[in-house]
Image (tube, rainbow, N blue to C red):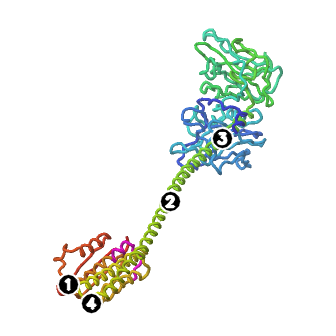
Amino acid sequence: MENKLQTLPPAPLPQATQRLGWHSHYSSTQDTVEWIELNLGRTERLDAVVLIAPPPGAGVKEAGYGFPLRFRVELLGEGDDSQRIILADYTANDFANPGLLPVFIPAEGRMAHKVRITATRLFHEDRRYLFALGEVMLLQGGRNLGAEVEVLGPPYAHASSSQGTRPDWGRINIVDGHSALGPPLGEKPSPTFGFRSKPTSEVLSVQNPWVTIDLGAVRPVEEVRLFPAHPPQFAHSHGYGFPVKYQIELSLSADDSPVIFSAPQSGSYTAVPGDNVVTVITDQTSARFVRLKVLEPHVSNGSVVLAMAEMQVWSGGQNIAMGKPVLASAHTEVDGWSNAALVDGFTSSREIVDWTDWLTGLSRRRETEQGLARLDERQVAIMADLKNLGWWGLGAFFLMLILALLTAYFRQRLARRKEMEELRQRISQDLHDEIGSSLGSIMLISDEALSMASEGELGQDLQEIRETARQTMDSMRDIVRLAQTGSYGGDDLPAHMREIADRMLRGISHRLTADEISGLPMDRRRDLVLMFKETLHNLVRHAKASKAEIQLKQSRGTLMLTIRDDGCGFSPAKVQGQGMGLTNLQRRADKHGGSVEITSASGHGTTICITLPHHG
């Protein structure tokens, strides 16, 4: 696309003018329908319709001001009930704002008496909506038939509504030749500035200076085009030397009375054309001599001067004035000014080119630039998506890194836990095998010694040794059993506690009832078993009981162990702090957020209730 752009005409500098174009009424809704209709006065063949947004000026806040978002262009016959030809329909989707470049719509030689442009979605300005156009050109060959509509007058430019009056806004301004584009110029620089009369003081000036083109033969003249001068030394003076008032005179011979055509409003003092082309319609009048006669001259720095970059005479769809002889009341042949420069095909800056080719090229430039803008927007969006994707990718990378670190950490913990479990199993096995075997040997030796010893102090010592070894072996087995498994399944804990009760409460009638216990953490299980053994030890040693009731119950996240006996009882307040047994019970319960409740009285037995949370 960028290579294609190099082959298209460059965008011209925006032309400022007082005659901005046509402007509808303001609307509070965007979908209000507004339209403007141009009546040619007769049925004509059209090659193209060109739409141009208003030029910069008062009230025009941005390029493309007022250009509708959705619209259609129609060709109509003479009557209201005539057939309509839709030349272009952009009512389905929003049309990209063209800025100051033209929208060229080919008509391909279709016939039309009227041309209507209808907006179905209006331009948005602040909180209001409008439809505005700077210029509508109706091309036929190298001519713009819009100039003929200007001659016919405002009644031939009909609109749904119109905001403002001339010179700024008005229906007829839409065909006055004043546009943001200026004249159709190529890229070849001009060798001359154009024609200029000899500057004279206002007192000594010729009353009505003139310049005449001799066509060499009588020809029917369709129109005369005037290109204002704009030399570099007067860069800020658009339309340098353009007369304030003037007329075009056509005559068959030098001595014949001329046919006079007045200047259009677009070329009058009240609407200085700047660099825009001024077209005077001459209605196919036959003539050999075409004269521009000044009625009120232009004054520059106190001097009267008539200047014109180019003067064209159109006949049969061609400019027949090119290279023809030029006569003048007074002229300057110096510094780029000459009579011949009036008909050399150049303005003061560049060559004059064909309207159709130039407008077509500018319209394609607009489409290409808009295509490039869309590509840039898409590229920005893609880059934003890639940036977001990069951030997401970076986030995903760090997330994966964190997950990998966490996975490695938990694997390491599992490995350490496995190692600790294996170590615990080995220690348990060693305790069972080595110390258990030694304790067993002690018991066997004690049994043999008891069989040979006589009753007395030695026998009592051996009996105590044997009993201590047995108790130590029982305790070791309990510890090993706790260490060898991390959790008991089903009724394993109640079975274990039942074995302990049967072993420790020999000679005491007892009963143990228990719920199924599962999922109790190992450290809590260990302390529960130790607290249970501590309680049974105290019962056997101090209670002098004949019967005991043991209950293990699980309810709503709480594990409750209750031990009752019918022993002698005691006063908890009196023994508080005197022994380690009760203190150890309370310490182990506190460690797990539990409690120990002791109910006892002398001669009424004892009830100990141990409560622990079931979960960690």
Mark toward the start of the polypeptide (1 vs 4): 4
Q: Secondary structure at mark 2?
A: helix
Q: Closer to the camera, 429 or 309? A: 429
C-alpha span from label 1 to label 4: 13 Å
* Residue 64 falls left or right of residue 439: right
Relative to 345, is 464 above or below? Answer: below
Do callouts 4 and 2 mark residues in contact (Cβ within 8 Å)? no
Q: Secondary structure at mark 4?
A: strand
Mark toward the start of the polypeptide (2 vs 1): 2
Relative to 87, is 580 above or below? Answer: below
The residue that mark 2 highlights is 408
Q: Secondary structure at mark 1?
A: loop
Mark toward the start of the polypeptide (4 vs 2): 2
Residue type, numbered disc 3? Leu
Mark toward the start of the polypeptide (3 vs 4): 3
Magenta part of the protein: which range?
516-529
The residue that mark 1 highlights is 569
C-alpha span from label 2 to label 3: 52 Å
The N terminus lies in quadrant: top right
C-alpha span from label 3 to label 1: 100 Å
**Mark 2 surroundings: few (<14), some (14-19) or many (≥20) residues within 10 A:** few
**Mark 3 surroundings: few (<14), some (14-19) or many (≥20) residues within 10 A:** some
Q: Closer to the camera, 388 or 476? A: 476
The residue that mark 4 highlights is 547
**Mark 1 surroundings: few (<14), some (14-19) or many (≥20) residues within 10 A:** many
Residue type, numbered disc 1? Gly
Residue type, numbered disc 4? Lys
* Circle on res. 372: 3
Q: Is residue 521 magenta?
A: yes
Relative to 497, is 129 above or below? Answer: above
